[in-house]
Image (tube, grey):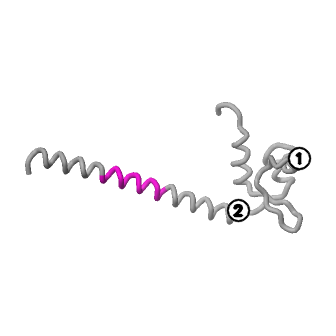
Amino acid sequence: MNKSSLTDLGTAITERLRGLDEAIEIAIESVARAHETVAERDEPFIGKEEAAKFLNMCVGTLERRMAEQLGPPRYIDGGKVNFRRSELKKWREKWRVGAV
Protein backbone atom coordinates (compact mmCIF):
# COMPACT_ATOMS: atom_id res chain seq x y z
CA MET A 1 0.00 0.00 0.00
CA ASN A 2 1.36 3.40 -0.87
CA LYS A 3 1.28 6.49 1.33
CA SER A 4 -1.70 8.03 -0.53
CA SER A 5 -3.78 4.88 -0.05
CA LEU A 6 -3.00 4.82 3.67
CA THR A 7 -3.97 8.48 3.99
CA ASP A 8 -7.25 7.82 2.16
CA LEU A 9 -7.91 4.81 4.37
CA GLY A 10 -7.16 6.86 7.50
CA THR A 11 -9.53 9.60 6.34
CA ALA A 12 -12.29 7.09 5.60
CA ILE A 13 -11.89 5.47 9.02
CA THR A 14 -11.93 8.86 10.75
CA GLU A 15 -15.14 9.86 8.95
CA ARG A 16 -16.75 6.53 9.81
CA LEU A 17 -15.82 6.90 13.47
CA ARG A 18 -17.22 10.43 13.51
CA GLY A 19 -20.49 9.07 12.14
CA LEU A 20 -20.53 6.35 14.81
CA ASP A 21 -19.91 8.94 17.53
CA GLU A 22 -22.92 10.93 16.30
CA ALA A 23 -25.09 7.80 16.16
CA ILE A 24 -24.08 6.82 19.70
CA GLU A 25 -24.82 10.33 20.98
CA ILE A 26 -28.28 10.27 19.36
CA ALA A 27 -28.98 6.83 20.86
CA ILE A 28 -27.93 7.99 24.34
CA GLU A 29 -30.18 11.07 24.10
CA SER A 30 -33.06 8.89 22.96
CA VAL A 31 -32.63 6.50 25.89
CA ALA A 32 -32.38 9.44 28.31
CA ARG A 33 -35.63 10.93 26.95
CA ALA A 34 -37.38 7.57 27.21
CA HIS A 35 -36.17 7.19 30.80
CA GLU A 36 -37.48 10.67 31.69
CA THR A 37 -40.83 9.85 30.10
CA VAL A 38 -41.17 6.64 32.13
CA ALA A 39 -40.09 8.41 35.32
CA GLU A 40 -42.62 11.20 34.74
CA ARG A 41 -45.39 8.72 34.02
CA ASP A 42 -44.70 6.98 37.33
CA GLU A 43 -44.45 10.26 39.24
CA PRO A 44 -47.38 10.88 41.58
CA PHE A 45 -49.69 13.83 41.12
CA ILE A 46 -49.89 16.73 43.56
CA GLY A 47 -52.79 19.11 44.15
CA LYS A 48 -53.08 22.87 43.71
CA GLU A 49 -52.01 23.74 47.24
CA GLU A 50 -48.85 21.66 47.09
CA ALA A 51 -48.10 22.92 43.58
CA ALA A 52 -48.43 26.54 44.68
CA LYS A 53 -46.13 25.88 47.63
CA PHE A 54 -43.60 24.17 45.33
CA LEU A 55 -43.70 27.20 43.01
CA ASN A 56 -43.45 29.59 45.97
CA MET A 57 -46.70 31.39 45.11
CA CYS A 58 -50.13 31.58 46.67
CA VAL A 59 -52.93 29.39 45.34
CA GLY A 60 -54.75 32.48 44.04
CA THR A 61 -51.78 33.45 41.87
CA LEU A 62 -51.58 29.92 40.49
CA GLU A 63 -55.31 29.91 39.74
CA ARG A 64 -55.05 33.33 38.04
CA ARG A 65 -52.16 32.16 35.86
CA MET A 66 -54.16 29.08 34.88
CA ALA A 67 -57.22 31.23 34.03
CA GLU A 68 -54.98 33.45 31.87
CA GLN A 69 -53.60 30.32 30.13
CA LEU A 70 -50.16 31.14 31.56
CA GLY A 71 -50.13 28.42 34.18
CA PRO A 72 -48.11 25.22 34.29
CA PRO A 73 -49.16 21.97 32.60
CA ARG A 74 -51.94 20.31 34.57
CA TYR A 75 -54.26 17.34 34.55
CA ILE A 76 -57.95 17.58 35.37
CA ASP A 77 -59.67 14.52 36.73
CA GLY A 78 -63.26 14.82 37.88
CA GLY A 79 -62.87 18.57 38.38
CA LYS A 80 -59.73 18.16 40.51
CA VAL A 81 -56.60 19.85 39.15
CA ASN A 82 -53.37 17.88 39.49
CA PHE A 83 -49.74 18.59 38.65
CA ARG A 84 -46.45 16.75 38.40
CA ARG A 85 -43.42 18.23 40.16
CA SER A 86 -41.12 17.57 37.21
CA GLU A 87 -43.42 19.56 34.92
CA LEU A 88 -43.73 22.35 37.48
CA LYS A 89 -39.95 22.54 37.66
CA LYS A 90 -39.65 22.79 33.86
CA TRP A 91 -42.37 25.46 33.76
CA ARG A 92 -40.70 27.45 36.53
CA GLU A 93 -37.36 27.37 34.67
CA LYS A 94 -39.08 28.88 31.64
CA TRP A 95 -39.89 32.00 33.70
CA ARG A 96 -36.36 32.44 35.11
CA VAL A 97 -34.77 35.80 34.38
CA GLY A 98 -31.05 36.51 34.46
CA ALA A 99 -27.98 34.38 34.91
CA VAL A 100 -27.68 31.67 37.49
Q: Main secondary structure of the magenta part?
A: helix
Magenta-drawn segment = 16-28
Q: Which residue is mark 2?
A: 43
User: Is residue 6 toward the left or the right of residue 60 in the image?
Assistant: left
Residue 64: mark: 1
Residue 39 % position (x, y): 64, 62
User: Is residue 71 toward the left or the right of residue 11 in the image?
Assistant: right
Dot 2 crowding, Cα within 10 Å, few <14, some 14–19, many 20+:
few
Secondary element at image label 1: helix
The residue shown at (13%, 49%) is 5
User: Is residue 8 toward the left or the right of residue 97 in the image?
Assistant: left
Residue 2: mark: none
Q: Nearer the viewer, mark 2 or mark 1?
A: 1
The residue shown at (82%, 49%) is 69
Q: Residue furthest right?
A: 60
Secondary element at image label 2: loop
- Label whose residue precedes the other's in the sequence (2 or 1): 2
Which quarter of the rendered picture does the C terminus lie within? Answer: top right
